[in-house]
Image (cartoon, rainbow, N blue to C red):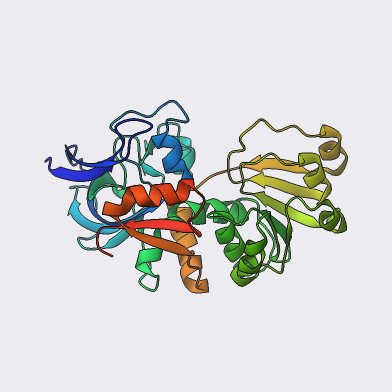
Amino acid sequence: MSSSAKGYAASSSTDALTLIKFKLKDLLPDEVEIAIDHCGLCGTDLSYIKDKFQITEYPFIGGHEIVGRVVKLGSNVTDLSLGQKVGIGFYRGFCNSCSFCNSGNENLCSSKESTIASHGGFSDKIRVQGKACIKIPDTMNYKNVSPLLCAGITVYSPLVEYNVSQSSKVAVIGIGGLGHIAVMFLKKWGCEVTAFTSTESKKADALQFGADRAIGTYDTDEKSHFKEYFDLIFNTIEEDLNWNELLNLLKPNGRLHFLGLPKNKISFDIINLLRFQKTISASIVGSPSRISKMLNFASKNGISPETEHFHFSDINKAINRLKEGKVRYRAVLSWNT
């Protein structure tokens, strides 16, 4: 059973997005149709629009931080109901038969399907596997949930994966769309949080988000006071940094974890890792079950991203603000504002 939908599409890597109509694929037994209310806009969407990874097919409809209501159910979907509010993150479907899917790590499935593989959340409807839908707690601010489905799970997942202690001392490099959410989660997790930012005005913001202190990202003198101080460092920025200097800020057994993609290849002194058993790791997003746990944690602890809201008709305005670095801190698009 097919139906039509509308969405804002890029026809090339340089053109503004325009509203188009398109046909939805037939609803499969394990799928649901979602009427989209809100969708976050993040840097990954811009990368796909610009074909940064050389895999974008035009016309391209982005959007992978989707919040909406179930309006159609496939015949095999029994754990969702019509009208239920749900979220969909970066992945819309999985093979459901591999070892990763069977162990609750669907985000590692080699056959997983990206939400923006065909058309994403910059539309009024989408069809996805029921398994990809995350029930939204009633206590959450519905309009502000979208960024948590990408940035929220990206910062939450390593806390669980690496058993980060509540007594850990953690540094967050970059207080932007991802970093400000990291500060919120880490503080509610119980950690001592140090924010690194190159923007003076964001130091006050970081403290407001829960950081115990805020220092300059490139201030070598300030950072010298934190040698072998941190158990964990989250890097959320693209810019090149002095990676060996950062490794020196870690305690033995400490971890430098990348939550984003640096612009260039990184290099570091392997001796520092070998002598003190330090670790470099990276990850993005997480499995549906972990996203659900993340939303429950956020709901219980009152975590809500700092957002700017735009009507979908102003999507190009929102994109330009994001490109210019003017969005503080996440952009959310809505069909009804």
Residue closest to the eye, 265 or 103: 265
Residue 211 image position (x, y, % from top left)? 67, 67
**Residue 298 in sight from this viewpoint:** yes
Residue at x 61% of width, y 35% of height: 263
Residue closest to the eye, 205 or 193: 205
Residue 129 image position (x, y, % from top left)? 30, 45
Residue at x 42% of width, y 30% of height: 51
Looking at the figure, which quarter contains the C terminus? bottom left
Where is 212 relative to 225, above or below?
A: below
Residue closest to the eye, 114 or 173: 173
Residue 149 falls left or right of residue 127: right
Residue at x 61% of width, y 62% of height: 183
Residue at x 49% of width, y 60% of height: 294
Residue 336 image position (x, y, % from top left)? 25, 63
Where is 215 relative to 107, above or below?
A: below
Residue 36 image position (x, y, % from top left)? 26, 55
